[in-house]
Amino acid sequence: MKSILRPALKFFLAFFVLYGLLTGVCLLPSVAGWLSRAYQKPTERILKPLLPKAYLQLRSDAGSPEVFRVEYAPRQQVATQMQQSGAEGSTSIAVQGNHTKVEFYNLFLTFFLLFIALMALSPLPLKSKLWKTVLGSAVFYLFTVFKMWLALLNTFNQPEIGIYQLGSFTSRLVSAAVSFLTLGVNLLFVLLLWAVLVFDKSNWEVFLKKAGFFNLK
């Protein structure tokens, strides 16, 4: 047991130092704003075809880089406004809609940095570590987009919004899924993703032996 205690302590100390440094850098408003905008652009392109009944845009919240807004309106309403605007000879319109705020840190950044720190300290060959980090980052990103899609679908299904009108069973299923996908699930997803990428069949046994699981009496 003592043989694994020191390496474990070194790993966790290095992890907390690295994670703290990454978090500190990403808390800088200029860095946080850039990361948030980089997240918004592809996410908006993915969400639009997944929610075709809604006209939506992702926008940074002025003065709050840790937050961005999802602005939305029924697509039919926007089409009607555009037709009216064209009939009146106007070249631009102000879409009347709603918006919801998304905590970028809670949705993505906090757990993404956790994953990056874990991968950086994992005992893998450099080439393998790089491509697995890229793969894992893409998987986690898509997971967060899936969470956003569910949350927006649930919002759009509310009677006061009415963009979508799901059946009672589907509505309950979506609402339950949104309630289930908490911050704790984010953490669990990152840890499982890291374990799947880092430990394969050949080194799971080595890892468990070093941890002393095969030496218990």
Image: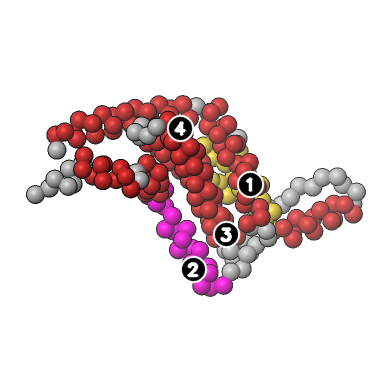
Q: CA distance from mark 1 to mark 2?
A: 26 Å
Residue behind mark 2:
172
Asked if residue 19 shows in the view, the reply is no
Residue 90 placement (x, y as % from top left):
87, 47
Predominant SS along the magenta part: helix
Which of labels 3 and 4 is toward the front?
4
Does label 1 or label 3 sit earlier along the sequence? 1
Q: Earlier in the sequence, mark 1 or mark 2?
A: 1
* Circle 1 residue: 44
Identify the residue at image location x=59%, y=36%: 38
Q: Which residues are magenta?
A: 167-187
The quadrant of the picture occupied by the N terminus is top left
Where is mark 4, residue-wise? Answer: 127
Residue at x 66% of width, y 52% of height: 48
Q: Is residue 189 magenta?
A: no
Type of amino acid at the residue the image marks with label 4: Lys
- What residue would you read off at disc 3? 153
Looking at marks 3 and 4 on the same chain, the residue that comes earlier in the sequence is marked by: 4
Residue farthest to the left, as pictured: 217
The label number, if any, that marks residue 7 in the structure image: none
Label 3 vs label 4: CA separation? 39 Å
Q: CA distance from mark 4 to mark 1?
A: 31 Å
